[in-house]
Image (cartoon, rainbow, N blue to C red):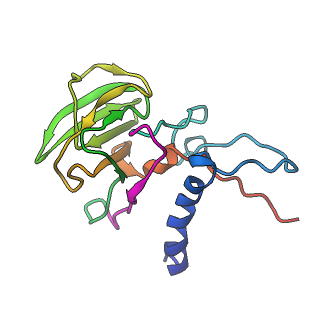
């Protein structure tokens, strides 16, 4: 069973790197040995590949998360399967990572763009209007559309969801460096 303290502290730990160094994480301490960061995928937990660069914020500014990721208690349970980013109506949306367009179109009341990075990973942005076609290649940082309206975001946010092997994961893992815990001496 998860401790109530863990539930309170985990979201704070996810946001802490956003508050330091404009989203780049804390600066390394000059007196401590520097070790390469190991991604979740390198440890087998479905994150980005070990050599993968951090993703580019999809609105071209440091991440401003207005709605955090909340994992559902089970596959079909309620939750928030992504993050909401504060957006300007009509503002440009850029590809956080390169890949190929796997879906572009309307889902219920909002326009959605999905990009497949590899055989395991797909990210989707909504509400985003786009002229891209399925199969189009996109590179990280390329404009893929504009902030539209609809869904729970309307025009004041863009929702970013990431699926690895068909399961939703917290998108922040692709934007933030993983902390390295060192023993106290």
Residue found at the far top of this picture: 136
Q: Position of residue 110 (x, y in %)?
A: 16, 45
Position above or below: 73 against 96: below
Q: Would you say 23 lies left or right of 110 here?
A: right
Q: Name which residue lies at 33% across and 44% down.
A: 166
Image quarter in which the C terminus is found:
bottom right
Residue found at the far bottom of this picture: 4
Q: Would you say 73 lies left or right of 21 here?
A: left
Span of residues in magenta: 59-74
How many labels sit on residues?
A: 0
Q: Position of residue 15 (x, y in %)?
A: 53, 59
Magenta segment's dominant SS is loop
Q: Toward the viewer: 70 or 90?
A: 90
Q: Name which residue lies at 21% across and 22% down.
A: 133
Q: Would you say 132 lies left or right of 174 here?
A: left
Q: Toward the viewer: 76 or 10?
A: 10
**Which quarter of the figure has residue 114?**
top left
Q: Name which residue lies at 38% across and 42% down.
A: 165
Q: Position of residue 79 (x, y in %)?
A: 31, 63
Q: Name which residue lies at 27% across and 52% down.
A: 156
Look at the image and say whether residue 33 sits in the magenta stretch.
no
Position above or below: 48 against 183: above
């Amino acid at each position: 069973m998860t401790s109530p303290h863990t539930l309170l502290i985990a979201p704070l730990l996810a946001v802490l790197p956003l508050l330091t160094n404009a989203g780049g994480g804390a600066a390394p301490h000059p007196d401590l040995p520097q070790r390469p960061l190991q991604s979740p995928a390198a440890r087998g937990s479905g994150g980005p590949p070990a050599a993968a660069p951090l993703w580019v914020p999809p609105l071209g500014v440091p991440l401003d998360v207005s709605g955090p990721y909340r994992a559902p208690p089970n596959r079909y349970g309620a939750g928030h399967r992504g993050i909401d980013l504060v957006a300007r109506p009509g503002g440009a949306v850029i590809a956080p990572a390169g890949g190929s367009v796997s879906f572009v179109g309307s889902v219920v009341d909002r326009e959605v763009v999905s990009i497949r990075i590899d055989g395991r990973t797909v990210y989707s942005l909504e509400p985003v209007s786009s002229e891209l076609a399925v199969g189009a290649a996109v590179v990280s940082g390329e404009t893929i559309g504009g902030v539209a309206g609809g869904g729970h975001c309307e025009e004041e946010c863009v929702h970013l969801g990431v699926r690895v092997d068909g399961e939703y994961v917290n998108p922040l893992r692709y934007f933030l460096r993983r902390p390295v815990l060192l023993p106290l001496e």
